[in-house]
Image: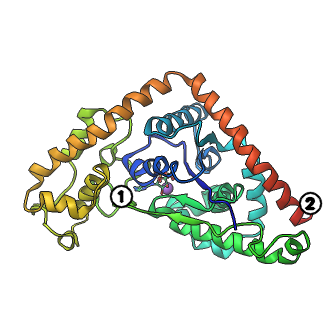
Amino acid sequence: PFTPRVFSGVQPTGNLHLGNYLGAVRRFVAMQDEYPCIYCVVDLHAITVWQDPVELTQATHNVTAAYLAAGIDPKRSIVFNQSRVTAHAELAWIFNCVARMGWLNRMTQFKEKAGKDRENASAGLFVYPNLMAADILAYQATHVPVGEDQKQHLELTRDIAQKFNHDYSERLASLGYGEDGMFPMTEPIIQGPATRVMSLRDGSKKMSKSEASDASRINLTDDADMIAQKIRKAKTDPEPLPSELKGLEGRAEADNLVGIYAALANTTKDAVLAQYGGQGFSAFKPALAELAVEVLAPMNDEMRRLVADPGHLDAVLADGAARANEIAAPILHDVKRVVGF
Ligand code: ADP
Ligand code: NA
């Protein structure tokens, strides 16, 4: 049996948005009460698509600031950036040799991110899921809080863990490992009303850093006026809100706004509809804007304060990296021994 441990990460690419917050970061905060947690700024992942070096450094600070402003406690949890701990890249190489081409060919995120010009995508973008498996398994992490879009990558992580445990089973046994082998079967934790926050402009697309229109997402750096304006202009339909959940079927935009409200208010979509059912968006949108500002504004202030002190952020990252390395280095040492290095 593996010691319960949480690992997750966010890429330092552009601004964090409400989807990252509700689907991931906010849940990172909650998990600190139950588990030892490791929260990474995954800068190795970021460079699978071109990043301006100056902006990458800045974005690494921004994500770190968002983590802390959201309530991740860097004394209790480990907060660091991936490139400072060499185990990630080393284990990723081993996993490049465990994962099969066919497994990676099935990854929908690669298809989305590479687009039509696959020949011109970086090789790193293709093997990205192997690096993600390494991030998790370098700590033998048992739980990974993520948004729904990461479910397939977590399945791949389990496939890699299983194949490694299987391929090296004799070796593991001869070195005294029990039935569980080297790596756990890591569980994704995908929970709550906002596991997939959608674009404010198009209910069929997830809210993302990469959508061209800034009006499609609420950035954690947006001020109160901007948040209110984006919610006011969010695409909706002309019907009032239904009073029951099944009335949201086929109404992606309405469903999305109700889900966002529920997540921000720490309640369920049912409870939101019990309160707002029968009302139009002219009443619901201002209420949602007010709630969003109430939750996000204090975080926004704190992020600004933190980003103004990059020395402090670097100290947090350096301390986190040292603690992360203390966990990962002995695991990687054992992995190398198993492989025969
Ligand atoms: P992005 O997908 O915006 O580039 P990342 O890949 O760094 O961001 O994802 C960081 C975390 O945020 C992941 O756990 C991911 O599942 C989650 N996430 C990203 N977009 C959304 C969304 N629209 N709704 C819910 N969670 C999301
Ligand atoms: Na993502």
SS state under label 1: loop
Horizontal placement of 308 versus 336: left or right?
A: left
Find disc 1 in the rendering and name its residue: 194
Residue 23: which quarter of the image?
bottom left
Q: Nearer the viewer, residue 10 or 110?
A: 10
Residue under the point 14% across and 51% down: 284
Residue 303: which quarter of the image?
top left
The amino acid sitting under disc 2 is Phe
Residue under the point 11% across and 62% down: 277
User: What sort of colour scheme is used for the picture?
Assistant: rainbow
Q: Residues within 10 Å of mark 1 (few under 14, many from 20)?
A: many
The amino acid sitting under disc 1 is Ala
Q: Nearer the viewer, residue 119 or 206?
A: 206
| Mark-to-mark CA distance, 2 and 1 | 44 Å
Find disc 2 in the rendering and name its residue: 341
Horizontal placement of 190 versus 54: left or right?
A: left
